[in-house]
Image: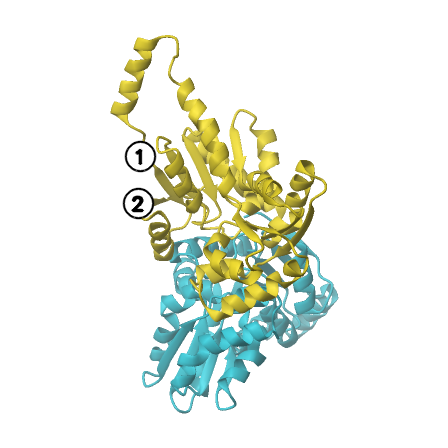
Chain colours: A yellow, B cyan
Amino acid sequence: MIGIFDSGIGGLTVVKEIKKVIPKASIIYFGDTARLPYGNKSPETIKKYSREIVEFLEKRGCGTIVIACNSASALAADWLRDKYPHLSIYDVVSSGAEAVAGVTKNKKVGIIGTTATINSGVYKKKIAELDSSIRVFTRACPLFVPLVEENWIKRPETKKIARTYLRPLKLQHIDTLLLGCTHYPLLEKVIGGVMGKRTKVIASGEKLTEKLHGSSASILEAELPLGDRKLAEELKKEYNYRGKEADKYFVSDLTEHFQNLAQKILNENIKIKKIVL
Amino acid sequence: MIGIFDSGIGGLTVVKEIKKVIPKASIIYFGDTARLPYGNKSPETIKKYSREIVEFLEKRGCGTIVIACNSASALAADWLRDKYPHLSIYDVVSSGAEAVAGVTKNKKVGIIGTTATINSGVYKKKIAELDSSIRVFTRACPLFVPLVEENWIKRPETKKIARTYLRPLKLQHIDTLLLGCTHYPLLEKVIGGVMGKRTKVIASGEKLTEKLHGSSASILEAELPLGDRKLAEELKKEYNYRGKEADKYFVSDLTEHFQNLAQKILNENIKIKKIVL
């Protein structure tokens, strides 16, 4: 059972990816829509919220937790791993840092994200641990989330704002730009257009699904008692018979806007339940 | 003791106004910065948060409550008055509706605010109660709050967005535009520039302070036992001696950004305390 959380609905893009790669996984999603956004809140508050959600997901049987929110990944992931060593905690910042470090050729990369993510300095730190010769240029882009929420994806206003935000990064001739926020992939075309063809634009969640796949595949195999073929077959039959558990979707506040957005992202009819932590 | 609350720091503009008009009032302010913004949340969640804050302020001795947040005023004010009939509850929507109804000459007014405020339809309802011949045109402007938070007050991007949002209202030839959100007065110049000189732009909080003044003055007088002049003088002396209680400022999440913004709005050095409700 994989628990995935985000401050809002944006993390469903990660869910979609996981469902594609690991169709057998049972997923519990939690979007903290009653308290979003996290990106302009303090580290203490982001840690507190993240912890409440992890405890909720653990109680529901999740042994694997995916933090799909960049702000929570940046401020709370390492802290949560210390607190819950028995859980496997994956986060989009670690996988994002690995992705850019693996892609850059001229060793100049850009990171954009919320104010909380950028101010945390965590991307710079994680990339330096992987390759200290990489120069990292960062920029907080707090208007990108509300622009996506307003669905102004293709508007000239959005393009103008993107140009303003990205100009300093472009002047540094970065060859890789990481979208350090789950909302930003929806602006990938605008951002790519501003940066030009020489800059590779990658989403922080891309690498994460791969990592998770490797690990979950082995978890699923481990569940079959190898060495006892018959029992394994039986178990496998039973597993197929029971099928996977139905995915569950929770939010802390439910508006029509979120319902529609969730449907649009997952492209399927899901039932979202509201729950107060 | 007057309790004032807002989803964030913006309500301090109302505090500033009150301090000017009723310098004797002791003020307790609460900004729900850990859960802001309210404008994109559901009516149930906005009511729940508002109720928690009113209970906090009442416990601290406030008999008068001012809701400085338009979304909370729109969704929770009448509901809170029913629930707490012993408290005097003032809200920016009621005073804003009175203000536009008193100002318009051509009986065509515009209201802008957050999605929650506009979708609630409360301005239309309150204005119709005052004068059913007034035609009310509304528009949600969800990007205005993040633009103010980003401090992009005078930027061309902001002007472009304002033009897009306000065009439909301008085409209706409204003569009065109400800024139905505590953040919007900071964009008054841009908004006024787009609307032109024929449209009067008014802030929802303007009328509120007047109303509160009338009532608080009589509350302060009532505290003096009229008829017993000597005792009254004594009490008054004591009142002067004790002076008013120091104003108190609370938030649910404290970042440097908020601290700076609060200082800027009030133009004085205040101590803000973080408290979890």
Name the amino acid type tagged 1. Answer: Ala
B12 relative position to B87: left or right: right
Q: Position of residue B138 (x, y in %)?
A: 39, 75
Q: Looking at this rendering, what residue extends furthest in the left direction? A: A241
Q: Is residue B133 above or below residue B141?
A: below
**Numbered disc 1: what chain?**
A
Q: Is residue A32 visible?
A: yes
Chain assignment, label 2: A
Q: CA distance from mark 2 to mark 1?
A: 10 Å
Where B47 sits versus A48, above or below? below
Question: Could you tell me which secondary element the residue under label 1 belongs to?
Answer: loop
Q: Does residue B48 sit above or below A233 in this rendering? A: below
Tell me the amino acid under the disc marked 2.
Ile
Q: Is residue B53 left or right of residue A267?
A: right
Q: Residue at x 41, y 73 (%)?
A: B139
The answer to whether residue B37 shows anywhere in this view is no
Q: Earlier in the sequence, mark 2 or mark 1?
A: 1
The one of A202 and B267 positioned closer to us in this rendering: A202
**Residue where numbered disc 1 is placed:** A246
- Which x, y percent locates residue B162? 50, 75
Circle 2 packing at 10 Å, graded few (<14), some (14-19), many (20+), is few
